[in-house]
Image (cartoon, coloured by chain):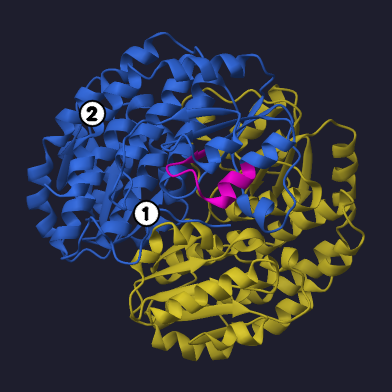
Chain colours: A yellow, B blue
């Protein structure tokens, strides 16, 4: 098992610790947040962490009715005209905690007197030092260039913070079921390895998710792109209907993220339309009828509610990206021309 | 000249009228906004209109220091848990004004007592009827499926609203220079027609812009995708460095949107890196040195400041998408499987 595969397989363990041993830090952050007037959230992040930010946008919106904006770092670092904030919780998400543009958004939040929070795997990093509150993702060192366990640890951190903010007592219980669901999902690794050989010629694809799994579409597209050099473009199913669907012709590969939940009927409808166009459908779902429409079915276990499904639904995508890299003759552990830590202004 | 090309060429005329004869509506909207407490802006839009929303995020952020969030319609229409808004101006942008998800965000804003504004080409549409304030883009009927003149009219509407809100007296004067700059840019149409034949085999590309022209990257990628069936993915140059740059190998086509401004040095740096990897560079710029690095140079005139450049920089992209469609044997006026108006929930 190579380093990337090992880290993919460490995810159940990382999440088990985070949801149990390390839950105290979320309760402390939540109490600090409750002492402040917070009517908006602003999140700064890049790359994989930006996909965790997308998850936060839906989860905090859904569970706490908080309007969440994604920051535009260039307004801070390039144009030097940061927005005037009011009653805003400013969150920076970064595995390494070192990207100067993300640190700049937190520093500006501090200087405007806002409450700031860093979600990072490096609690001594510049990002953590700049923020008033710090959540440590406790994912352990990630040596592969591609982020996998730090991504799901960021998603879990967002969900645990939401749980600690007290939307609903059942949230924590659900999150504690996630490690086992991931474990079960990982079992399809060998099957996906065989499937990947059929896709060795794949050069481009669309990855579609909506709502809670909008982030999953982005993250799978990012992984498949950086590991297997497939030009994978993520879309919300609604945006996809507003134009990009024109790209689909017979044999075009489309990956649908379609777990049970309020989005499922729309995804099933889309699957039908895509089948009529003879697209090559890869489907991630816990619903047998939905999976039946796929040429490549990537099952996830039942019983995880929609809001927690992004933690599980990304797993087949990680496995696919890894195996596809091998099938296409690339090294998924050290992708060409990428560094683990990217510092942008 | 086909219908799409005619509409592309109508843009100077549309913008001339909008910035002169129809400026009154922006002043009226701005006065209404000034009577209210507005500390945040929330914008709902899909497809091309969403790219105009992206422009508003940077322009209102830069010129008025307003934090601007892009709405997540599924929280309204699918999950039925809209965020609780406070002191928020809610804007819906839609050419047709009919997409139910965008109307839902405006209706919810109204019911929460927020000020609402529709920016649309159809002042009698459901969106316009739902909103308290209406800005009519006055682009005239757009018959091609692909939005071109309605897009630049939306960008101009955002900029004219910003001007009316009174950031700086020179804004309006600058906007009135834009029609001529577009006129000059359109003159390269024949040259781009010949160039397009060299790209008849193009299947995928990355389109890169940042800051004010982040929207331009998205809009050109959308046009090239829906008209010429090229899988074009937009990126901010900062995000591109965090992973997707791995996709670039010799001959990979990358389009850079690089007009003069604070982003230019970063784009020049990126151009250098991409040249080292022997990428096939298409560059839109008003800077001769920058254009010199391109295999396909797409010049725009000097003298338009960065904040207004998206109105001009998108033009070569529209022309390229049109000509590329022909070069690849498609009909750019009626792309397969797209409708002019897409209604999503």
Q: What residue would you read off at disc 2?
A: B12
Q: Which mark is residue A33?
A: none
Q: CA distance from mark 2 to mark 1?
A: 22 Å
Q: Whole-percent x and y of residue A227?
A: 45, 69
Residue A200 visible within the image: yes
Say which residue appears at 56% left-offset and 90% top-offset: A190
Q: Are marks 2 and 1 on the same chain?
A: yes
Query: Measured along the vertical axis of the image, is residue A182 above or below residue B216?
Result: below
The residue nearer to you, when weighing B5 against A337, is: B5
Query: Measured along the vertical axis of the image, is residue B317 above or below residue A112?
Result: below
Q: Residue furthest front?
A: B124
Q: Secondary structure at mark 2?
A: helix
Q: Is residue B183 left or right of residue B274?
A: left
Q: Whole-percent x and y of residue A3?
A: 57, 74
Say which residue appears at 59% left-offset and 60% top-offset: A214
Give the chain of mark 1: B
Q: What residue span does the magenta drawing correspond to?
A: B92-105
- Specify whether residue B93 is painted magenta: yes
Q: Is residue A16 left or right of residue A232?
A: right
Quadrant of the frame with the N terminus of chain A: bottom right
Q: Are marks 2 and 1 in contact (CB under 8 Å)?
A: no
Say which residue appears at 17% left-offset and 29% top-offset: B183
Q: What residue would you read off at disc 1?
A: B340
Specify few, some or many for label 1: CA neighbours under 10 Å numbering under 14, 14-19, or 20 or more. some
Q: Whole-percent x and y of residue A198?
A: 40, 88
Q: Secondary structure at mark 1?
A: loop
Residue A236 visible within the image: no
- Specify whether residue A214 is painted magenta: no
Q: Whole-percent x and y of residue A303?
A: 79, 78
């Amino acid at each position: 098992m190579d380093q990337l595969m090992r880290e993919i397989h460490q995810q159940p363990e990382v999440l088990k610790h985070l949801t149990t041993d390390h839950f105290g830090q979320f309760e402390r952050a939540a109490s600090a947040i409750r002492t402040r007037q917070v009517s908006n959230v602003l999140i700064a992040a890049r790359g994989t962490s930006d996909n965790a930010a997308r998850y936060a946008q839906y989860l905090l919106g859904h569970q706490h009715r908080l309007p969440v904006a994604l920051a535009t770092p260039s307004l801070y670092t390039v144009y030097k005209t940061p927005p005037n904030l009011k009653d805003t919780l400013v969150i920076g998400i970064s595995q390494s905690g070192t990207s100067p543009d993300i640190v700049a958004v937190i520093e500006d939040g501090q200087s405007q007197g806002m409450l700031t929070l860093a979600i990072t795997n490096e609690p001594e990093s510049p990002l953590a030092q700049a923020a008033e509150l710090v959540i440590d993702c406790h994912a352990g060192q990630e040596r592969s260039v591609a982020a996998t366990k730090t991504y799901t640890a960021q998603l879990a951190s967002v969900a645990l913070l939401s749980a600690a903010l007290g939307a609903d007592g059942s949230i924590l219980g659900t999150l504690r079921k996630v490690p086992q669901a991931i474990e079960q999902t990982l079992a399809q690794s060998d099957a996906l390895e065989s499937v990947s050989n059929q896709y060795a010629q794949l050069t481009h694809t669309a990855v579609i998710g909506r709502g809670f799994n909008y982030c999953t579409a982005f993250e799978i597209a990012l992984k498949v792109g950086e590991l297997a050099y497939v030009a994978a473009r993520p879309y919300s199913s609604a945006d996809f209907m507003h134009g990009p669907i024109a790209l689909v012709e017979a044999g075009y590969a489309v990956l649908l993220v379609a777990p049970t939940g309020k989005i499922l009927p729309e995804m099933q409808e889309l699957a039908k339309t895509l089948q009529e166009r003879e697209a090559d459908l890869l489907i991630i779902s816990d619903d047998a009828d939905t999976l039946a429409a796929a040429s490549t079915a990537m099952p996830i276990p039942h019983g995880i509610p929609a809001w927690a499904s992004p933690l599980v639904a990304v797993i087949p995508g990680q496995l696919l990206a890894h195996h596809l890299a091998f099938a296409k003759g690339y090294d998924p552990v050290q992708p060409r021309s990428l560094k683990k830590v990217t510092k942008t202004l």
